[in-house]
Image (cartoon, grey):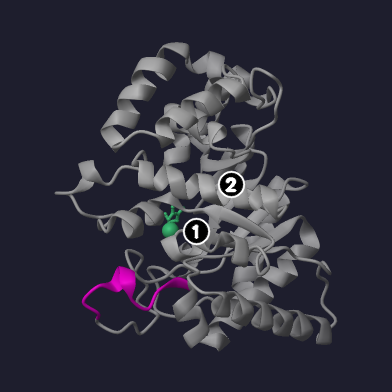
Amino acid sequence: FARRLLSARHKPCVTADNVPVALKANVELPAEAILAVDHGAQGIGLYRTEFLYIDRTTQPGEDEQYEVYRAIVEAVSPQPVTLRTFDIGGDKFASTFQLPAEMNPALGLRAVRLALKQPEVFLTQLRAMVRASAHGDVRIMVPMVASVHEMREVRRLLSQAIEQVKARGQAFEEHIPLGMMIEVPAAAVMADVFAREAEFFSLGTNDLVQYALAIDRASQSLAAQASPFDPAILRLIKFVTDTGANHKRAVSLCGAMASDPLAACLLVGLGLRELSMEAAAIPEIKEAIRRLTVEEAEAIALRALACDSADAVEELLARELAPRL
Ligand code: PEP
Ligand code: MG
């Protein structure tokens, strides 16, 4: 079975009626980029840069970051790499940042909110990313965006970072797409407005589930209720994919649900044409997607959207979809 999956790694990822679905990899460590290509990833859909800031006493400098980003970009080039700006805070700690003690850190100073409070640290990261763009197809993605003001501020700082790199005479690509994670419900319901601010969207269902269902993503006692199959989540996803299509914005999904074969087929039915996941899951997800037509996936998705609970959705998928995979 494993051999069959591995031999499928360079088959195209298309539905049974030949509609392409891009499968990319989520990467945390630079070494994983090679693994991703090995598993047939069509690029890196999410590079979590947090690891650069974790388990150390000083902040990573611009050159150090640039070397890491460049290595990743070169490892997957000409495939694209989406570099996510640091998502520190909440469940992701970094002792080099002086984070305030908050009652609810997941609802506190985190990710883009922290970046905008520490513009010099953020500019250092942005300059390193801008310089990496000279070596391949680089896109920059912002985590935890909740308001248009944040995207405008990030864009202003990105322009500043580009000016600084240019002034030094260093190489970079003129147009670096700037996109955002949709992982806060406010951003999902405002997707039409955000389409004016962001060049692409990536749904972060790990946090979207946490914030939409008000269940801590680390909670053991409520883990069973924190389901990405909750129809509330599926409706948010559908709204974002429809809105992205209407406004010509690519929509990807990089939460853990993308690596579940049943969920992946459902997501195709909800309109997604790009998924990003841990590299090891790519062969199996590709096999699953190749078994269904878009029309079949859409029919299941429509029924899932009309369900009244996550349990009902899971029963539907187990009954109608699982026997097909
Ligand atoms: C998410 O929230 O779904 C996501 C992909 O980001 P992270 O898990 O790093 O918060
Ligand atoms: Mg997240």
From the image, give the main secondary structure of the stretch colored magenta: loop
Figure check: 132 above or below 46:
below
Residue at left 82%, top 87%? Answer: 167
Between 34 and 290, the one nearer to me in the picture: 290
Identify the residue under disc 1: 188
- The image shows residue 318 at horizontal and vertical percentages of 35, 20
At label 1, which amino acid type do we have?
Ala
Residue 236 lies left or right of residue 176; in this view the side is: left
Figure check: 39 above or below 196:
above
Figure check: 74 above or below 301:
below
Between 193 and 120, the one nearer to me in the picture: 193
Circle 2 — which element?
helix
Q: Quarter of the picture for ligand 1?
A: bottom left
- Say which quarter of the image contains residue 13: top right
Residue at left 57%, top 39%? Answer: 35
For the record, the magenta segment spans: 102-111
Q: Residue furthest front?
A: 306
Between 170 and 93, the one nearer to me in the picture: 93
Q: CA distance from mark 2 to mark 1?
A: 10 Å
Which class describes the residues within 10 Å of circle 2: few (<14), some (14-19), or many (20+)? many
At label 2, which amino acid type do we have?
Thr
Name the disc covering residue 157, or none: none
Residue 213 falls inside the magenta stretch: no
> From this viewpoint, is residue 30 visible?
no
Identify the residue under disc 2: 241
> From this viewpoint, is residue 128 visible?
yes
Figure check: 37 above or below 185:
above
Residue behind label 1 places its C-beta within 8 angstroms of ligand 1: no
Residue 48 lies left or right of residue 168; in this view the side is: left
- Say which quarter of the image contains residue 135: bottom right
Q: Earlier in the sequence, mark 2 or mark 1?
A: 1
